[in-house]
Amino acid sequence: MPEKYILKLYILGSNAASELALKNLREIISHESNTQFDLEVIDVRRHPELAEDARILAVPTLIKKLPKPMRKIIGDLSNKQKVLHSLDLISQG
């Protein structure tokens, strides 16, 4: 049974960077057919307390909660190889 990934994407409304990060992440997830993802998108304008609890200093920020180790990726997620490596979906090399 494949491992389930729990991801949280913190964005700031519907600005260009937020939209691009969400588009890039959905594209990456769609190509990982052997992996199950649970994605929660959190708008820090609507839920500033969640951003504070997660210690979000910049947006967009993607947090991989599970599987461990927890990782944070800041930016629009346009570097697919870096994102895949950070999520432990590919090895660096």
Image: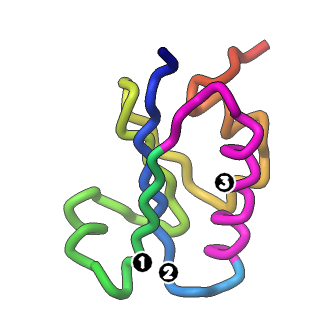
- Please give the residue where the numbered disc 2 appears in the rendered image: 12
Q: Which mark is residue 18?
A: none
Task: Name the amino acid type tagged 3.
Answer: Leu
**Secondary structure beneath disc 2?**
loop
Q: Position of residue 54 (x, y in %)?
A: 27, 57
State the CA–CA distance, disc 3 to disc 2: 16 Å
Please identify the quarter of the rendering in which residue 49 is found. Answer: bottom left
C-alpha separation, residue under disc 3 versus residue under disc 1: 16 Å
Residue 22 belongs to the span the image colors magenta: yes
Q: Position of residue 10 (x, y in %)?
A: 45, 66
Amino acid beneath label 1: Asp
Q: Is residue 49 left or right of residue 58?
A: left
Task: Kindly identify which residue carries mark 1.
Answer: 43
Q: Tell me what residue is drawn at x 79 percent, y 13 percent.
A: 93
Furthest residue to the front? 1
Using the numbered discs, state the Cα–Cα distance from disc 1 to disc 2 in whole angstroms.
5 Å
Mark 3 and mark 2 in contact? Answer it, CB < 8 Å.
no
Q: Is residue 61 above or below residue 81?
A: below
| Colouring convention used in this rendered image of the protein | rainbow
Residue 73 drawn above or below residue 67: below
Earlier in the chain: of badge 1 and badge 2, it is 2
Residue extent of the magenta highlight: 17-37
The earlier-in-sequence mark between 3 and 1 is: 3
